[in-house]
């Protein structure tokens, strides 16, 4: 188990995608980055080089979903690195929304509200055919406990929430309240965070 106080993480979300524009939840499905999303990815790469300094001392990880992998490759190129040279890890994938995938958020809420857990215990609510926030928290924790040096991580909104939760020791309520943007870079070290750009 790593000493989280000794590991620095540089974390950013994938760039804007078609499903973001249309207000749909893609979850573990996918859609292409928009032109704007590709610009965001390149900007994050340039920002990473500015903020992190020597990039050869860092490990690079991304969710294997195309939107995160494409963002990582664009960011690495913008930072002056080969597009390859990162690891894809399934534990960094977005939460599985199951039957709620490809629906709008209001539609998901209307359906999920039929289950009393949605209001009484949202952390443990399981999307039909999918998973809960508790399960996402668990698998992101498994990933974080494999890190043995500073790292760059490109992932998703849900995954970023859980990285912050583990690294900063957040409550469930504080974890769920965070809404990461598609642009900008989050640095976490020693139980503290700083946000750049965006």
Image (cartoon, rainbow, N blue to C red):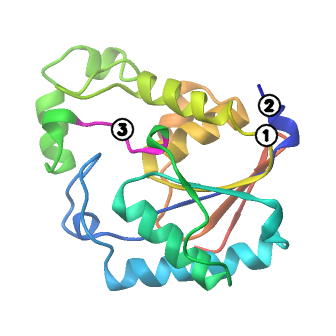
SS at mark 3 in the image: loop
Mark toward the viewer: 3 or 2: 2
Front residue of 155/118: it is 155
Label 1 secondary element: loop
Q: Determine if the magenta segment contains residue 42.
A: no
Give the main secondary structure, helix, strand or loop, of the magenta stretch: loop
Kindly state the secondary structure of the residue where label 2 is placed.
loop
The magenta-colored residue range is 92-97
Real-space CA distance between mark 1 and mark 3, rounded to the nearest whole angstrom: 25 Å
Query: Residue at horizontal 46%, vertical 84%?
Result: 39
Q: Residues within 10 Å of mark 3 (few under 14, many from 20)?
A: many
The reply to whether the C-beta atoms of the residues labelled 2 and 1 are less than 8 Å apart is yes
Residue 130 place in picture, x, y as percent: 24, 29
Q: Which quadrant is home to the N terminus?
A: top right
For disc 1, the marked residue is 148
- Measure the alpha-carbon separation of dots 3 and 2: 24 Å
- Which quarter of the figure is the C terminus placed in? bottom right
According to the picture, the residue beneath numbered tag 3 turns out to be 95
Picture residue at 54% right of the left edge, 35% below the top: 175
Say if 111 sits above or below 43 in the image.
above
Along the horizontal axis of the image, is 193 left or right of 95?
Answer: right
Q: Are marks 3 and 2 in contact (CB under 8 Å)?
A: no
Residue contact at pointers 1 and 3, CB within 8 angstroms: no
Sequence-first tag of 1 and 3: 3
């Amino acid at each position: 188990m790593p000493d989280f106080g000794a590991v620095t993480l540089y974390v950013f979300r994938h760039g804007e995608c078609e499903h973001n524009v249309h207000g749909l939840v893609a979850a573990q499905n996918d859609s292409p980055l928009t032109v704007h999303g590709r610009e965001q990815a390149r900007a994050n790469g340039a920002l990473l080089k500015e903020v992190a300094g020597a990039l050869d001392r860092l490990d690079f990880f991304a969710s294997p979903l195309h939107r995160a992998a494409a963002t990582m490759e664009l960011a690495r190129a913008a930072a002056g690195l080969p597009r390859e040279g990162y690891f894809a890890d399934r534990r960094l994938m977005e939460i599985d929304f199951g039957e709620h995938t490809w629906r709008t958020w209001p539609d998901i809420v209307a359906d999920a509200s039929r289950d009393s857990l949605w209001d009484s215990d949202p952390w443990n609510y399981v999307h039909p055919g999918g998973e809960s926030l508790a399960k996402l928290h668990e698998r992101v924790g498994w990933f974080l406990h494999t890190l043995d040096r500073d790292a760059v991580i490109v992932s998703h909104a849900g995954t970023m929430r859980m990285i912050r939760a583990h690294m900063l020791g957040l409550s469930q309520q504080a974890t769920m309240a965070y809404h990461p943007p598609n642009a900008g870079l989050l640095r976490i070290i020693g139980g503290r965070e700083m946000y750049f750009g965006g």
